[in-house]
Image: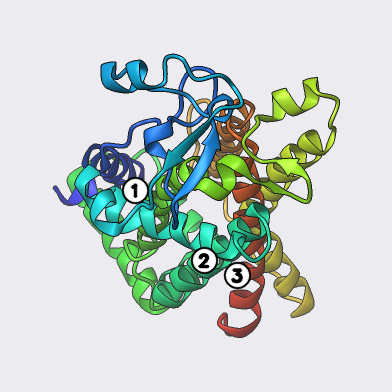
Amino acid sequence: MKDFFRNKKKFLLVVMLMVVTLTGCSVPRGQNGKTYVNSIYTNNDVQVKRGDVDIPDDKELQKKYKDYKADDLITIEKTTFSDAMDEGWFNGLIVWPIAFLINFVADFSDAGIGIIAATFLIQLLIFLFSIKSQVASQRMQSIQPEMNKIQAKYAGKTDDRSKMQQAQEMQALYSKYKINPFGTLLVTFIQFPVILGMYQATMRAYSVVTGSFQGINLAKTPIEGFNLGNYWYVVIFVLMVAFQLLSFKMPQWLQEHRKKKMHVKEKKYAEPKKKGGNGMMGSMNMMMYMSTGMIAIFAINWPLGMSFYWLVNSLARVIQNIVIHKFFIKD
């Protein structure tokens, strides 16, 4: 059991599977990419054009809106907290508050500003509740050479005594720098359901379904925007991918910058040899590129509002990394 929890990849996989299972998320959009009319969250009674929404595979709704034309208006009643909770705790506790905030801010500006406000507020709250874990995560990178030394020392040794000694030396290293290795998973554990919630909220918030950012329709996908000849969709998509990579690499670059600034000459320990790999850093980079690639593939067919959220979220993480490195990481 202890070995299982030491394996972060397995632990993270189980955590994510549990979250997905518990949330029971459903896609609130039809195959045409438009949000189902009964999935829209709104702060007030509103009307939407039939052509801007999709009708789910529900006999009553299909019959009700059968004769509606694209420009005919459909009235949607205000979505209450109780309404959202009836769909499940995840929708009530996470999706509804985010959608409510986006709609509230959008009433005074537009949907894009609503997404920006919601994203920065959420990231600020996560930052305040998980600052110690984020600091520990950056410290983990600073002790990587010492970890490499320990791993190289026991490379190829599979007997129980060697495994125990390696675990003890690793634990001593964590204690020396006051790092809780499992505490670094807290940020991921918190952010993952929030990402799912934001994904749902950007598709379900009335202001996003019917609104825009500086004239750019956030309900359309990057491919649709490109086909319409609006290259701002491509610009936002490319910036999203670029800042996603930047947010991953920023802690590493900041650490290297600090070492150069302090003229730290660090002994380079050989990493344990692994078949088909380039060590721990190579594995981390591979995971970073793969996750970014997957996000980019999915985002092609996501509403632009979600890509816009990823862009703003990545920018917020870059700012967080700089703040942590400057004010919380001691020399």
Residue 22 place in picture, x, y as percent: 21, 42
Question: Residue 192: in sight, yes or no?
Answer: yes
* C-beta proximity under 8 Å, tags 2 and 3: yes
Q: Amino acid at mark 3?
A: Gln
Residue 161 or 288: which is nearer the viewer? Answer: 288
In space, the residues marked 2 and 3 are separated at their CA atoms by: 9 Å
Is label 1 or label 2 in front?
A: 2
- Judged left or right of residue 80, residue 278 is right
Secondary structure found at label 1: helix
Secondary structure found at label 2: helix
Circle 1 residue: 8
Compared with 136, 317 (above or below) is above
The part of the image, by quadrant, that contains residue 289 is top right
- Mark 1 burial class by Cα count in 10 Å: few <14, some 14-19, many 20+: some
Q: Residue at 31%, 48% (x, y): give it.
A: 91
Circle 3 residue: 320
* Residue furthest left as drawn: 1
The part of the image, by quadrant, that contains residue 312 is bottom right
Residue 211 place in picture, x, y as percent: 64, 45
Could you tell which of marks 2 and 3 lies nearer the N-terminus? 2
* C-beta proximity under 8 Å, tags 1 and 2: no
Circle 2 residue: 123
Question: Residue 6: in sight, yes or no?
Answer: no
Q: Residue at 59%, 56% (x, y): give it.
A: 115
- Mark 2 burial class by Cα count in 10 Å: few <14, some 14-19, many 20+: some
Could you tell which of marks 1 and 2 lies nearer the N-terminus? 1
Compared with 81, 12 (above or below) is above
The part of the image, by quadrant, that contains residue 165 is bottom left
In space, the residues marked 1 and 3 are separated at their CA atoms by: 23 Å
Q: Amino acid at mark 1?
A: Lys
- Judged left or right of residue 320, residue 272 is left
Compared with 198, 93 (above or below) is below
